[in-house]
Amino acid sequence: MIVRAVILLMLCGMTVLLCQLSPQAKGGEKAGVLAELPLVAGSFVADTEAPSEKEIEERKRERELLPADTIIVKRKYRTPGRSVENRDVAHASLVIAGNDSRSIHRPEVCLDGQGWTITSSTVREVKMISGAVLRVKDLAIESVVLQNDGTKQPLRAHYVYWFVGDDLSTPSNLERQFLSMRDSVLRNVNHRWAYPSVMARVTENFAPQFSGERRRNDAETVEMILSLIRSLAPRFQKDLMTTL
């Protein structure tokens, strides 16, 4: 019993000493991303149409839930100059934390609150043109939409995201928390985390004239999202920009 008490006291003393000797962590003022999304990314161009009233209301609610110094950038991308039968559409978002860490969190929580059900979670690798590999998490999600005739139609989508720190990235929120603690102590770095994401619907159950997109199954939708990320990420993620 005495030996255990001595060991506990020694561990507490070492912890206090480590805290005193460790340099003060830097503020998270330097983000690993640019606070902008490009107008053009590969074969995709950003939609220049004004957001709808529903989109404006959704963005307003989102900002009310997040700390005031959170930076949020959103763009809707589409393949231009193509008929509806061949068009792809995807929604990209970039959230950059301020001083409050609540800006960055597991997206699974928000998706559930928005009425989506997560059916699977897969870590995927996106190989950049430069040869660099970006690991992202693909969430397969589903919901129900109400049609004009009152019938309910199942809707599937894929939500792909990752976290970006000062000079690194990860698809895991648990790993992000570990890296934050590790680098704060060992590297004197306090990551200002960013959270990029791309979402697109699975449209195989919807006619192109109603969805405004070509028919895509799950595999084709994932392939389209990863293709957009391959062109998009090096345009705003700094550690990928250096390998262009």
Image: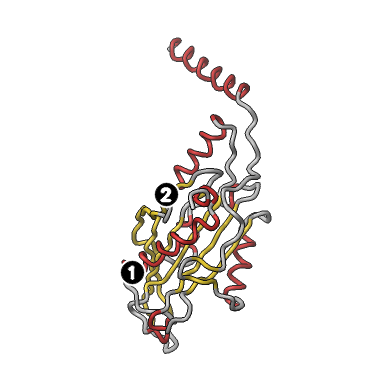
> In this rendering, which labeled residue sits more in front, label 1 or label 2?
2
Which residue is drawn at the image coordinates 59% and 21% (left, top)? 16
- Residue 57 in sight from this viewpoint: yes
**What is the number of the mark on residue 220?**
1
Label 1's element? helix
Circle nearer the N terminus (1, 2): 2
Residue occupying image coordinates x 39% and y 68%: 157
Q: Which residue is mark 2?
A: 132
Q: Residues within 10 Å of mark 2 (few under 14, many from 20)?
A: some
- Using the image, tell me which numbered label, if any, was put on residue 129: none
3D distance between C-alphas at marks 1 and 2: 23 Å
Q: Nearer the viewer, residue 136 or 2?
A: 136
- Amino acid under disc 1: Glu
Graded by Cα atoms within 10 Å as few (under 14), some (14 to 19) or many (20 or more), the crowding at tag 1 reads some
Q: Residue at x 45, y 66 (%)?
A: 199
Location of residue 74 (image quadrant): bottom right
Compared with residue 18, is residue 129 higher up or lower down, i.e. above or below?
Answer: below
Give amino acid for label 2.
Ala
For the residue pair 243 and 188, the one nearer the viewer reads as: 243
